[in-house]
Image (cartoon, helix red, strand yellow):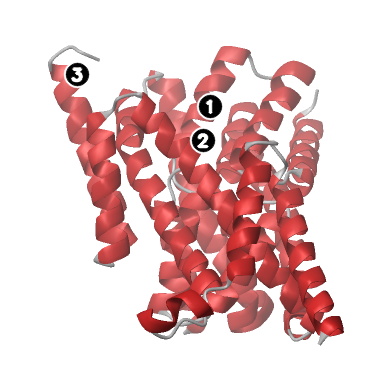
Amino acid sequence: MELIELFLAFLQVGALSFGGGYAAIPLISRQAIDTYGWMTVEDFSDLVTIAEMTPGPIAINAATFIGMRVSGIPGALIATLGVILPSCIIVSLLAYLYYRFRKLTLIQGMLKSLRPAVVSMILAAGLTILIPTFFGNVTSLGNLLENTNYRAVLLFSAALLLLRKFRFNPIVVMLITGGAELAARLILKYLT
Amino acid sequence: MSTKKKLIKIFLSTLYLSAFTFGGGYVIVTLLKTKFVDELHWIDEKEMLDLVAIAQSSPGPIAVNGAIVVGYKLCGIPGICFAVLGAVIPPFFIIALISVAYNAFRSNEAVQAVLFGMRSGVCAVIASVVYDMASGIVKNKDMTGIILMFAAFTANFFFKVNVVYIILAAALIGVIRTLVEVRHGTH
């Protein structure tokens, strides 16, 4: 039963993630957190982090990771198969049509409208990771100021600066923020 | 070159590219072009651009889509199988190994600190990607696109509308818009 659920969930991710890796994130969180409850927001944030750090498409990383956790190697294989099956069918068909007709106006027109929607959904998925990171300890508006994680806000701002202004590689930026958090915790532990 | 040799070459190329490319599908598509157009001269430049457009405009991981178009062009269906296998094997094994060690790994305090810190980095990366994509749409003065962007965000973030419906609606709007433009001869 779980294998069928995994297959169907990742089939949807594969069939609907237009526009590359980041576009798959909202679809995966929808399936894994909301629909099937395979993971918490916390685990999902780790998954996105791990996927960013390792080579390969995020959708395949996520399918393998979630498949493994839900039902071991068979789960990982089924989920990965689900995520690539729509591509295999749709892209082969389009490649065939391309060599027959060499015209893609309609597809490119469709993509033009999909892109803005995809951008918004990537933003929304980013916010679902950002909000618990910054405000995880905030229980009401009254303690917003004292319970905000200012260190996370600072790391985020520094990371943005390194990415935009100094054109750092994203993986290097992530390693820096990870190392900085570890260093900060070690120093705080040493001082107290 | 014999078909068998060609298939092995396709498999090894996508395997290698998939194992060593960080940073998403757009990177791997560029590398596929370097390999098969500039280095091996198996595909000509103009054709490769069209194939890349197909890979990018289809759903699914762009790296896999790129492998499919190249595999199809060079060896048909067997080419697709070898190219996709090569693209999938590296991430599959790396993540399978990580997920086995994940629980032990996750309960370590130092690892927790690093993962938590990296979350801020991931958010910054996502923010940067969103900024680049959104400013492209705004700069093109694509009014429909800008409205779609706000509508999709409101529907998804505030009203929790299923992303599947948002994607299907946006695709439908795109098809209608293209058909109208073609009819008016503005395309």
State the residue at coordinates (22%, 34%).
B144
Sequence-wise, the earlier of marks 3 and 2 is 2
Residue B91, given in percent of the width and then of the height, sits at 71, 57
* Camera-nearest residue between B129 and B82: B129
Q: Is residue B161 visible?
A: no
Q: Are marks 3 and 2 on the same chain?
A: yes
Q: Amino acid at mark 1?
A: Leu
Chain holding disc 2: B
State the residue at coordinates (41%, 19%): A102
Tell which of A91 and B99 is nearer to you.
Answer: B99
Asked if marks 2 and 1 touch (Cβ < 8 Å), the reply is yes
Q: Position of residue B12 (x, y in %)?
A: 80, 41
Using the image, name the chain to which the residue with label 1 belongs: B
Q: Amino acid at mark 2?
A: Ala
Name the quadrant containing residue A115.
Answer: top left
Asked if B156 appears above or below A167 in the picture, the reply is below
Q: Quadrant of residue A167?
A: top right
Mark number, residue B51 = 1
The secondary structure type at the circle numbered 1 is: helix
Pick the residue in front: A81 or B171.
B171
Residue bearing the label numbered 2: B55
Residue B182's label in the rendered image is: 3
